[in-house]
Amino acid sequence: MTSSMIFATAASAGTGSTGAAFFVQILPLLLIFVVFYFLLIRPQQKRAKEHAAKIEAVAKNDEVVTGGGLMGKVIKVADDHVEIEIAPNVRVKAVKSTIADVKSRNTKPAND
């Protein structure tokens, strides 16, 4: 009988601190999530917003690169697509969302 009383006392003493033990076990997971948020998720969202703003600001005579690797000068801009001149008298239509990079006509080359 004495050994069963010891086990009952040990079991009841252990249940009082389970809240603190649970918090100590969850704390590393929360820290990992916070680190991932600030180092990975937040910067990626910022880059996506900047890219979307670039795409919306595409104007005539901007140099663009499409997702397929075509480079050219914007000739005409519509709501959801642009017309790009990739060679003299060679024009293609591209959906705005496929534009990977925009080089504004106001930027200067690095060599000058």
Image (cartoon, rainbow, N blue to C red):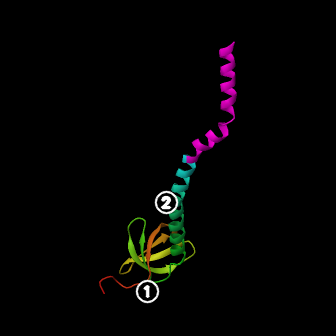
Viewer-proximal residue among 44 and 78: 44
Disc 2 element: helix
Residue at the far left in the pictured view: 111
Please report the bounds of the magenta region as a residue range.
1-27
Q: Going 38% across and 70% down the picture, which residue do you hit? A: 70
Q: Going 47% across and 72% down the picture, which residue do you hit? A: 93
Graded by Cα atoms within 10 Å as few (under 14), some (14 to 19) or many (20 or more), the crowding at tag 2 reads: few
Residue with the mark numbered 1: 106
First along the sequence among labels 2 and 1: 2
The type of residue carrying mark 1 is Asn
Viewer-proximal residue among 82 and 47: 47
Per the image, is 104 magenta? no
Count the marks: how many?
2
For residue 39, the mark is 2
Which quarter of the picture shows residue 100? bottom left
Residue 16: x and y in percent read 69, 35
Residue at the far top in the pictured view: 1
Disc 1 element: loop
Q: Going 55% across and 55% down the picture, which residue do you hit? A: 34
The answer to whether residue 92 is left or right of residue 112 is right
Residue at the far front in the pictured view: 2
